[in-house]
């Protein structure tokens, strides 16, 4: 049993998402940075999809009533914290683990060998906050909550290869995007500006969408768009010209024009954006986007190859 | 018809740029056909049907856009017989009492009908589910009588109760969960429209037929109580 002493800013149970229900209006959900999430689970010898904690900006304080092997993945945990990052470690029974504020990136993941024992709702343990579905009682953790550790397997903890560990730095380069369904509704000059200017991530951002602030991006086509399906990572542009990146807890359909779409390989980076971060977009073509995804998967595979 | 990449992980198939019953039938037929592919192709992750299009979210490490397009192409039908039976016909009891219908007067005024006529017209309609979106279980229903087409509220409500039945432009629908909302509210159903613990979790599916049945407050309370016990 793990007792939540302090919940942190927004700590939720996640896995790799809830697939197959978009036609019922249910978003994909799951870890905002699925690469860090998988690393945390793999470090403690879990299946990559095991239920673990997603930490947002300020981590929780947890009291372990039993001994456990845990790992925290991400880009920087508390300056004052002496906890190792991206490395599995043992926690003795009766120990209190205080994660504290994240020093880099917006999210970190805490995985426990055996995973968290959380009932699946619609085939997933991920928490969908807008409708209170899944995870720990459909909500973020609160002080006093008790988490149960799942069945532990024989698989021991693993280490990251030094090469991957060294490469785990927050990438501040531009977020890469492909064209989207209504890119042609914006003239060349506007598209050029979209790809050149810096946007600021607004405070009004969450797992459903990241609102960006910058020089307004106004479309030249005055057409009415029929509501249509929305791909993960779509950058839609409402009439005020301030783009929104639709993220893991997004609505499944929408009627605003879409100017671009974040490539799959860069979605984990979107999950690490903090309010007031500055970002730029760089246009790539689909074959390059898929190549980048393949490279990312290969690096992760090699990092854990024995 | 257009087939194009919506992203590196999504294929978008669009039949038209306007709403029609004929297009809707083609979308639903394709949606069901692609659903049938999922067992053999786990790379197909999510299907997003809408008024005149279907977006397919897939794993680009398992399928390419070209492969998916060639799987889907033979499933696209030119036309669906108009006498084709709908997948399901769901009856939804609705209580149109004043306390559940804060916008009934507005709708009546806008449509030049009496409030009683608005209720009768809404309850008599023959509806169908275009698609679900906005929030889990929220179905966009077509088939609303043209007199009842009323614009959305200028300022959306911050909180709409679960089960609220509303009108937004040419559509009617039911809010499955308490949420913000901009539709004109004219009634409420005691049914639980979305329950993540049941399978399928949503009472309505894309393509279903829908009928409303007017009920009084006594029946509303009785059915609401029954839903509580069934949980």
Image (cartoon, coloured by chain):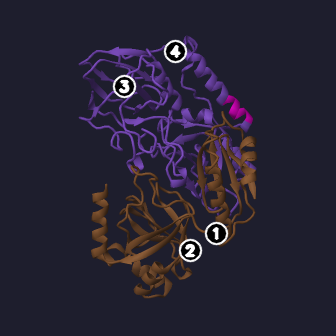
Chain colours: A purple, B brown
Task: Determine the image quadrant of residue B224.
Answer: bottom left
Task: Determine the image quadrant of residue B66.
Answer: top right
Mark 4 or mark 3: name the one nearer the start of the chain. 3
Percent coordinates x, y for residue A139 in the rendering: 35, 43
At numbered mark 2, what does the secondary structure look like: helix, strand or loop? loop
Q: How far apart in space, not on screen, are marks 4 and 1 (Cα)?
A: 57 Å
Q: Are marks 3 and 1 in contact (CB under 8 Å)?
A: no
Q: Nearer the viewer, mark 2 or mark 4?
A: 2
Q: How far apart in space, not on screen, are marks 1 and 2 (Cα)?
A: 16 Å
Q: Compared to B122, does B12 lie above or below?
A: above
Q: Which residue is mark 1?
A: B84
User: What is the number of the mark on residue A151?
Assistant: 3
Label 2: chain letter: B
Mark 1 or mark 2: name the one nearer the start of the chain. 1
Query: Does the segment drawn in magenta span residue B200?
Result: no
Residue segment shown in magenta: A287-292
Q: Which residue is mark 2?
A: B143
Residue shown at the point (31%, 68%) measured from the top left: B223
Q: How far apart in space, not on screen, are marks 4 and 3 (Cα)?
A: 23 Å
């Amino acid at each position: 049993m793990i007792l939540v002493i302090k919940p942190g800013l927004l700590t939720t149970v996640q896995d790799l998402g809830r697939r197959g229900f978009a036609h019922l209006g249910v978003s994909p959900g799951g870890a905002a940075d699925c690469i860090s999430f998988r690393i945390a689970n793999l470090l403690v010898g879990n299946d990559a999809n095991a239920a673990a904690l997603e930490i947002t900006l300020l981590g929780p304080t947890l009291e372990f009533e039993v001994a456990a092997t845990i790992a925290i993945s991400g880009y920087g945990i508390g300056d004052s914290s002496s906890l190792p990052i991206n490395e599995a470690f043992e926690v003795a029974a009766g120990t209190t683990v205080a994660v504290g504020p994240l020093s880099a990136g917006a999210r970190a993941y805490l995985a426990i060998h055996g995973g968290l024992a959380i009932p699946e709702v619609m085939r997933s343990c991920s928490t969908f906050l807008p409708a209170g579905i899944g995870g720990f009682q459909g909500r973020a953790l609160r002080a006093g909550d008790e988490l149960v550790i799942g069945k532990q397997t024989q698989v021991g903890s693993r280490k990251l290869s030094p090469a991957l560990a060294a490469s785990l730095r927050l990438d501040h380069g531009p977020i890469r995007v492909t064209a989207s369904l209504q890119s042609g509704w914006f003239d060349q000059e506007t598209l050029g500006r979209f790809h050149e200017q810096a946007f600021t991530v607004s405070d009004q951002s969450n797992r459903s969408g990241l609102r960006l602030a910058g020089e307004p991006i106004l479309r030249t086509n005055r057409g009415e768009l029929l509501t249509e399906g929305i791909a993960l990572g779509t950058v839609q542009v409402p009439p005020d010209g301030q783009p929104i990146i639709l993220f893991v807890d997004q609505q499944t359909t929408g009627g605003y024009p879409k100017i671009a779409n974040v490539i799959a390989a860069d979605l984990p980076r979107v999950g690490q954006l903090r309010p007031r971060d500055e970002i730029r977009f760089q246009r790539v073509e689909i074959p390059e986007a898929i190549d980048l995804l393949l490279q990312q998967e290969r690096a992760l595979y090699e990092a854990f190859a024995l | 018809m257009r087939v194009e990449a919506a992203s590196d992980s999504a294929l978008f198939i669009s039949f038209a740029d306007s709403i029609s019953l004929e297009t809707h039938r083609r979308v639903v037929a394709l949606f069901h056909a692609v659903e049938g592919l999922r067992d053999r192709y786990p790379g197909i992750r999510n299907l997003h049907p809408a008024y005149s299009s279907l977006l397919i979210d897939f794993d680009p490490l398992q399928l390419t856009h070209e492969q998916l397009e060639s799987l889907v192409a033979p499933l696209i039908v030119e036309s669906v017989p108009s006498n084709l039976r709908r997948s399901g016909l769901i009856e939804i009891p609705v209580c149109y009492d004043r306390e559940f219908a804060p916008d009934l007067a507005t709708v009546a005024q806008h449509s030049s009908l009496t409030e009683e006529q608005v209720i009768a017209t809404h309850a008599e309609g023959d509806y169908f589910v275009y698609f679900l979106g906005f929030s889990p279980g929220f179905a966009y229903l077509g088939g609303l009588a043209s007199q009842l087409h009323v614009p959305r509220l200028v300022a959306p409500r911050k909180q709409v109760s679960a089960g609220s039945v509303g009108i937004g432009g040419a559509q009617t629908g039911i809010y499955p969960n308490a949420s913000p909302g901009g539709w004109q509210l004219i009634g409420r159903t005691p049914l639980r429209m979305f329950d993540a613990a049941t399978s399928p979790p949503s009472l309505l599916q894309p393509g279903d037929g829908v009928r409303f049945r007017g009920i009084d407050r006594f029946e509303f309370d009785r059915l609401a109580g029954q839903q509580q016990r069934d949980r």
